[in-house]
Image (tube, rainbow, N blue to C red):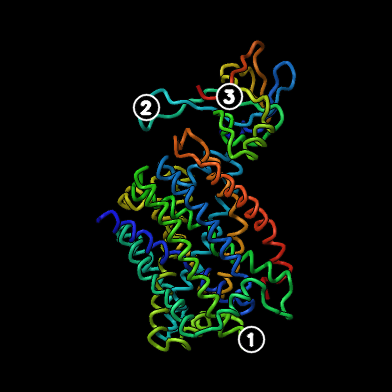
Amino acid sequence: MIITDLLGSRVFGPDFLGFVSDVRFFLESETEGQSARLYGILISPHARSSSLGFERSGVRSPWPIAALVRWRHRGSFLVRWSDIERLEVGRIQLRPGFERASPELP
Amino acid sequence: MKKSFGVALGILTAIGGFVDIGDLVTNAVVGSRFGLSLGWAVVVGVIGICVFAQMAGRVAAVSGRATFELIRERLGPRVAVLNLSASFMINLMTLTAEIGGVALALQLVSSVDYLLWVPFAALAVWLVIWRVKFSIMENVAGLVGLLLIGFAVGLFLLSPDWGELGRQAVQGVSTDTEKVSTYWFFAVALFGAAMTPYEVFFFSSGAVEEGWTEKDLAQSRANVLVGFPLGGLLSLAIAGCAAVVLLPQLISVTALSQVMLPVAMAGGKLLLAVIILGIVAATAGAALETTLSAGYTIAQFLGWPWGKFRPPAQAARFHLLMIICLIVGVGTLLTGVDPIQVTEISVIFSAVALPLTYLPILIVANDPEYMGEHVNGQALNGIALIYLVIILAAAIAAIPLLIITGAGQ
């Protein structure tokens, strides 16, 4: 599977929640050359497009672009990979009781 | 002392490296048809490239990341691939035009057909990329390119009616035969020639090649804010020469020899020789920059090791890719396609592709995660946003204008 298979997929809890707008990886340590591990998916209720990284921090400039992108992706949230119950082509079903996390980086 | 020498050298190479075949041809064509009435488009383009290159250079120096690494990171895979394809194709077209430019300039020196020079020009470009140190390559091409100041000297020697040139720049010329759409087509072309995307790929990747850090920000700013505007003055001098000599005679420029005609009239053989040498250096320098940019864009996007600071064996795919691009460029030129026309089309498509690379750089230049305290200030963001609108307008208008005017015919 490649990331493009996931991006834009429709995500369902019990009901429709939104689209996969990005995926989040993490590195276990600072060592160079290790492979990144998939942490979770970013779900945007209104837009399939990329949120250009604005979800990662509180950056609000340059003003009209940041405002537009933030508005398109309002209500975005992060769901851990382990909260995915079923993966199909173009459709992702989340486990009951999945957790909505903030998309901002800690 | 060493530091101020470094700053001066950087500025000089920025001036010499600013003008390429696109600027040479487009400015001369426009000067011969519209006088200096489109001088404003050069000014708008030069301020634009200053804003763009200043941001890209700062991002590269502070974050250590070059343009296409950021594009892939920020735009998402689909848009980034579209972006890469468009930028790469336009860069390849510019590369072809620059090699054609070197060959045409050598033809003027030798009277040997330019097609015979094309493979040698490409071979020379490859050898330099393979063997010569980055800083030497950049400095030599930039400093010899400074000989294009001959255009400014030529303009003074022609002792034109400065008032008339000024009037053209402010009020425009009465060109009954030219349509409004053609005027705007050439405005976009001049804008694209001044703001060619490869300049930014090269400038930001070059900053990484030379290991720039926050300490080099002042140098980067001086190169851009002093060097590029002075380079822009050379563009205006080229247009001015054409406006003084060619416009009254109704000679429209279709060959490189016509670009130099006014200089030959003004300064004779000596100045002509100086200019030809300058053109060879400027186009060869730009051929080097575009070839490297072809390697930079793809290698950065795909995460390959890249850069001249690595031995070729450690960046094998990067070097192989550049060799393939040179071969494709040579092959295209050997079909007999007119390099001047390739140039004219490439500057238009440069304008089309510009928003794709401008936007991610603008966004990252505002992100403290990458930039720390060196994020864009409010004033710069204001100017940068005005330019975003101009760049979008030029990009949207470019292809319709190309079709309506039949490429400005």
> Residue B177, how many percent across, how many down?
73, 80
Q: Which numbered mark, 2 or 3, is in the foreground of this view?
A: 3
In which chain is the residue bearing label 1?
B
Q: Identify which residue is drawn at 67% across, 20% down.
A: A93
* Marks 2 and 3 share the same chain: yes
Q: Which numbered mark, 2 or 1, is in the foreground of this view?
A: 1
Disc 3 designates what residue?
A103
**Rendered image: mark on residue B287:** none
In what element is the residue under mark 3?
loop
Kind of residue at badge 3: Pro
Per the model, the C-alpha gap separating discs 2 and 3 is: 22 Å
Q: Identify which residue is drawn at 38% across, 65% down.
A: B142
Quarter of the image holding residue B29? bottom right
In which chain is the residue bearing label 2?
A
Disc 1 designates what residue?
B250
The one nearer the camera, A93 or B31, is B31
Per the model, the C-alpha gap separating discs 3 and 1 is: 63 Å
Per the model, the C-alpha gap separating discs 2 and 1 is: 66 Å
Disc 1: CA contacts within 10 A as few (<14), some (14-19) or many (>=20)? few
Q: Identify which residue is drawn at 44% across, 56% down.
A: B224
Q: Is residue B35 above or below residue B14?
A: below
Disc 2 designates what residue?
A30
Q: Is residue B211 above or below residue B137?
A: above
Q: Is residue B8 visible?
A: yes
